[in-house]
Amino acid sequence: MSDIYVRPYDSGTKTPGKGVLPTILILAVLGGIGWWMSHRSEKKTDEPVVATVAQSVEALSATPQSSVVAKPSASAEKLFTRARSLMSSGKQSEASQLLGEVIATTTDASLKNNALRMQGRVNVELFLSEVPTADKKTYIIQPGDSLDRIARNNNTTVDLLRRINGIEGNLIFPGARLLVPAAPFVLEVDKSDRTMTVVIDGNRLKRYSVGLGRYGKTPLGTFKTVVHQTNPDWSPPSGGIVPFGDPLNVLGTRWISIVDESRPELKGFGIHGTTDRESIGGETSNGCIRMLNEDVEEVFLLIPRGTHVVISE
C-alpha cells in the first residue's frame, strides 16, 4: 500500500538571512529622510525628524516577513504524537479521529501531509477489516440472497463483501449479518494539487497522489466509471495493441475507464496504474489519471462500476 510522499515532519528547515532584511530597509529609510531634509530649503515643519524615523521603524517592524516559516501549533503536535501512540497500541479508530483534528487545525504543510498519509492508511485498513465502522452498515441476509445480489443492491462488489466480512467462496446463510458500505464511494480529483480523494458519505477515506495529463489535458467535470479491467492490454492512439506485461504498456495492473454521457466526444480517458513512480505528482499522461499500481489496486477493490468521478481544479 502506497502513500503520499512528503518531507518527514521531524526534518525542519532553517530560514536564512534572518534579521538582515529589516536592517537594510531601515538604512534605506534613513537615507531617504536625509535626502529629503537636504532639499527642503523652501519648506519647514515643526514635526521632529526623530518621530518620523520612529514611525518608519515601527511600520517596518510591523510588516510580516514572508521568509518566516509558520510552525505547527503545540496542540496539533501533541495530537499527532498521541495519534501515533494510539496506532502503535492498535487503537486505529481513535488514532484516525485525532489525525482528523490535526488535518483540520494545523497550519504546517508537512505535518498536515503526514497526518493525511497516516489517516488514509488507517482508514483503509479499518474499512477492509471485519471491524464495524461508521463507513459500514449491517445487512441481514435474506432467503434467496446471494453475494452478487447483495453487492448489486448495496452498490458494491462481491470481492469487497468477501474482504470486509472474511468470507471465502460464495456460501452465505439466511439470518447471518454482513457488513456492507454505508454509502456509495465518490472519487474527487483535484488538478491543482494533483490528488485523488476517495470519499464515502461525505467523509474522506484516503487521499492519493496522482499524475495527470500534460498541458492540462485531463478534462474537468463529473464522470462515472464503466470498464474495470485487471491486467489490461493497451490500445495506443497510434493504433495496435500492446499486451499486458509489455514494457511499452503504460496502463499498469488496472484500468478503470470514465465517461460523461453528456459529452460523448470525450473518449479514452480513465484511471490506471503505472510502475513509473517519478510520474506521480506531475503532468505526465495523455489525459488519464495515473496512479501507482498498489494505489490503483486498492481503489479498484473499493469501488464498483458506475462510481462517480468528480474532476475539478
Image (cartoon, rainbow, N blue to C red):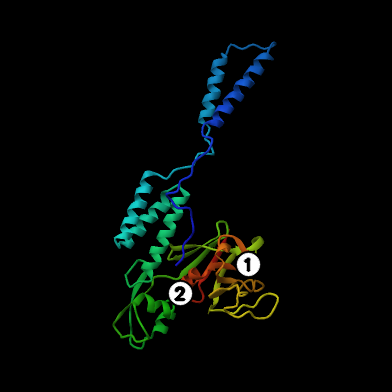
Give me the residue at 40% from left, 44% from top: 73
118 lies above or below 160? above
Indicate the amino acid at tag 2: Leu
Observer-nearest of 110 and 228: 110
Observer-nearest of 289 and 306: 289
Observer-nearest of 183 and 105: 105
Please name the residue that numbered disc 1 is placed on.
Answer: 287
In the visual, does 2 lie left or right of 134? right
Residue 275: name its quadrant. Answer: bottom right
Q: Which mark is residue 301?
A: 2
Q: Could you say whether the residue bearing mark 1 is in a helix, strand or loop?
A: loop
Indicate the amino acid at tag 1: Gly
Instruction: Tell me the quarter of the image containing the C terminus.
Output: bottom right
Q: Earlier in the sequence, mark 2 or mark 1?
A: 1
Instruction: Tell me the quarter of the image containing the N terminus.
Output: bottom left
Residue 203: name its quadrant. Answer: bottom left
Can you name the residue that lies furthest to the front here? Answer: 247
The percent position of residue 234, horizontal first and vertical second, equals 61, 77
The percent position of residue 155, horizontal first and vertical second, equals 44, 76
Give me the residue at 54% from left, 79% from top: 231
Residue 268: name its quadrant. Answer: bottom right
The percent position of residue 115, horizontal first and vertical second, equals 42, 55
Q: Residues within 10 Å of mark 2 (few under 14, many from 20)?
A: some
